[in-house]
Image (cartoon, rainbow, N blue to C red):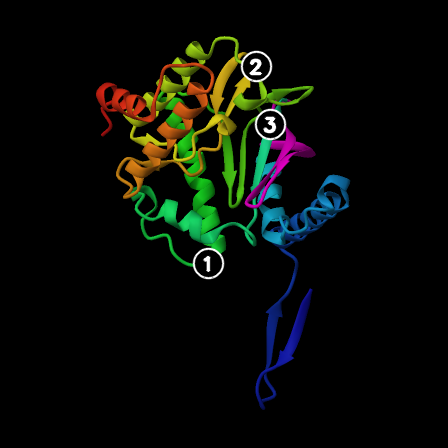
Amino acid sequence: MTEFVESGDSAEWEEIEVRDTEADRIARRQDREFSEFRKRLKDTEQFKVEGSVFDDATYAALYKLVQDDYLQAFGGPISTGKEANVYEAIGEDGETVAVKVYLTTTSNFQQMSDYLAGDPRFEGIRGTTTKVVIAWVRKEFSNLRRAREAGVAVPDPIAVQRNVLVMEYLGDEDGPAPTLDEVEIENPETAFSVVREYMRRLYDAGLVHGDLSEYNLVVHDGQITVIDVGQAVTVHHPNAEDFLERDCKNVASFFADLGVDVTTDSLRAYLDAEASPP
């Protein structure tokens, strides 16, 4: 179709091409598909109470993950919190995955900034809460990869998009994997040895968990697995020593209560002697 418009005060007419291009048609189709996708999620019962999480940018991130075949279908919430909610979903091969959606409105901006500041991988991250949250999600994805490469059992990171992280689901048909404080530990000495070795491997790879305790250790397929590594920092972070000391205190206290002969000082001495962080 061609339209004509008058140019200025002259009697000249300028021909303007307004015919639909293939790109226009594709863009409109994608807009329709995205609107339908967003409506389906909004109408899904488990998401109706989570309006603060799913702003338009989050819907767009989820849509991108669907378009890239990382996600096929969404299930109910696994856990909810002040900073993130975790949902079950079906991944590209039909396996159950976990989708962690960080809140861009209520996340603890200052606490996240404190963990990011001083991490050489994320130098220069400043600005709004949203920017910090997006950097935090990238940081968690990076930490998971680094931990797995070091031989630490953590969820397998699958994909990241804006404030959404897709990773391996830890659990079975009965629900998510229980934390260490929720199970009866038959052999505390063995369990402690496993956790201590994970700490050594992390430290040897240049990472400190920063919030390690019985609440961030789960039992999945008979194996102790570390979770919530978003706050993990490199050994070059200005607070890395304090965070490592806190991890040692939490782990030593938990296992000492189970009869293991360990103290904060002895655990820290072991890590200093056995690990060689970069």
Magenta extent: 69-94
- Residue 184: mark in rendering: 2
Q: Nearer the viewer, mark 2 or mark 3?
A: 2
Instruction: Give residue 236's quadrant in the image.
Output: top left
Total marks placed = 3
Instruction: Give residue 172's quadrant in the image.
Output: top right
Residue type pointed to by label 1: Thr
**Residue 26: x percent and y percent?**
64, 49
Residue type pointed to by label 2: Glu
Is the residue under label 3 in contact with that under label 2 (CB below 8 Å)? Answer: no
Residue 69 appears anywhere in the view: no
**Residue 156: x percent and y percent?**
49, 25
Mark before the other along the chain sequence, 2 or 1? 1
For the residue carrying disc 2, how many other residues have a C-alpha within 10 Å: few (<14), some (14-19), or many (20+)?
few
Mark before the other along the chain sequence, 2 or 3? 3
Which structural element holds mark 2? loop
**184 to 114, vertically: above or below:** above
Residue type pointed to by label 3: Val
Q: Which residue is mark 1?
A: 128
For the residue carrying disc 3, how many other residues have a C-alpha within 10 Å: few (<14), some (14-19), or many (20+)?
many
Predominant secondary structure, magenta span: strand
| CA gap, disc 2 and disc 3 | 26 Å
Q: Nearer the viewer, mark 1 or mark 3?
A: 1
For the point 59% across and 30% down, which residue is it?
A: 98
**41 to 127, vertically: above or below:** above
Judge whether residue 39 is colored magenta: no
For the point 67% across and 48% down, which residue is it?
A: 34
**Residue 76: x percent and y percent?**
70, 34
For the point 60% across and 27% down, which residue is it?
A: 97
Judge whether residue 83 is colored magenta: yes
Q: Which residue is mark 3?
A: 97
